[in-house]
Image (cartoon, helix red, strand yellow):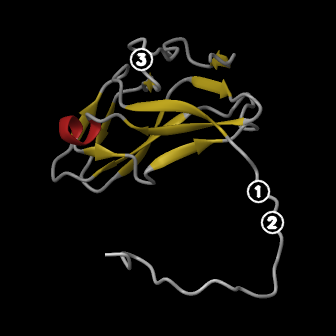
Amino acid sequence: MNIPVDIFRIHPDAIIPEYQTPGSCAFDISPVEDATIHPGDIVRLKTGLVCCVPSGYALLISARSSLPKKYGLCVPQGFGIVDMDYCGPNDELLIQLFNFSNKSVEVKKGDRLVQGMFVPISKAEFTEIKELTNNNRGGFGSTG
């Protein structure tokens, strides 16, 4: 199922995302700037894009599988979440990266560093309860 997504270029060199194969579930996202990322540094690279996430969806941004091995980089929070209402004229998609290696890493404008995927969301309706009736089961590996 395809969903319509409005995307706006705020930088002339911004690359509109594309799916690389017919079976891809995520599309690649690239920066519009070169950067040197020193060991232990976290940077945010501009993409030059504002993406209007459709109602009922979230955009998840995660590392491409080659990012750790090829560059020694990762997305420090695991993955980024872009909300439906992050779509103003200055709400540029940023690529946040952490250099976990022991050497400086060069990334170039246009490098496919991270990937995005639209996922449907449901919002919870919380009801406070006064008592729990289940038994404790432990946690953090308690099932073996």
**Label 3 environment density (alpha carbons within 10 Å; few <14, some 14–19, many ≥20):** few
| Residue projecting furthest to the left | 102
Query: Disc 3 versus disc 2: distance between alpha carbons?
Result: 37 Å
> Quarter of the image containing the N terminus?
top right
Disc number for residue 97: none
Q: Residue under label 2, please give it.
A: 126
Q: Residue at (77%, 32%) from the top-left corner? A: 55
Q: Nearer the viewer, residue 139 or 119?
A: 139
Q: Secondary structure at mark 2?
A: loop
- Residue 78 screen position, x and y as percent: 43, 51
Q: Nearer the viewer, residue 68 or 11?
A: 68
- Residue 56 screen position, x and y as percent: 75, 35
Q: Amino acid at mark 1?
A: Ala
Q: Is residue 81 left or right of residue 22?
A: right
Query: Disc 2 versus disc 1: distance between alpha carbons?
Result: 6 Å
Q: Residue under label 1, please give it.
A: 124
Q: Residue at (42%, 24%) from the top-left corner? A: 30
Q: Amino acid at mark 2?
A: Phe
Q: Residue at (46%, 84%) from the top-left corner? A: 138
Query: Disc 3 versus disc 1: distance between alpha carbons?
Result: 31 Å
**Label 2 environment density (alpha carbons within 10 Å; few <14, some 14–19, many ≥20):** few
Q: Secondary structure at mark 1?
A: loop
Contact between marks 2 and 1 (CB within 8 A): the answer is: yes
Q: Nearer the viewer, residue 135 or 55?
A: 135
Q: Residue under label 3, please give it.
A: 23
Q: Earlier in the sequence, mark 3 or mark 2?
A: 3
Q: Amino acid at mark 3?
A: Gly
- Residue 3 screen position, x and y as percent: 67, 19
Query: Does 116 sit above or below residue 3?
Result: below
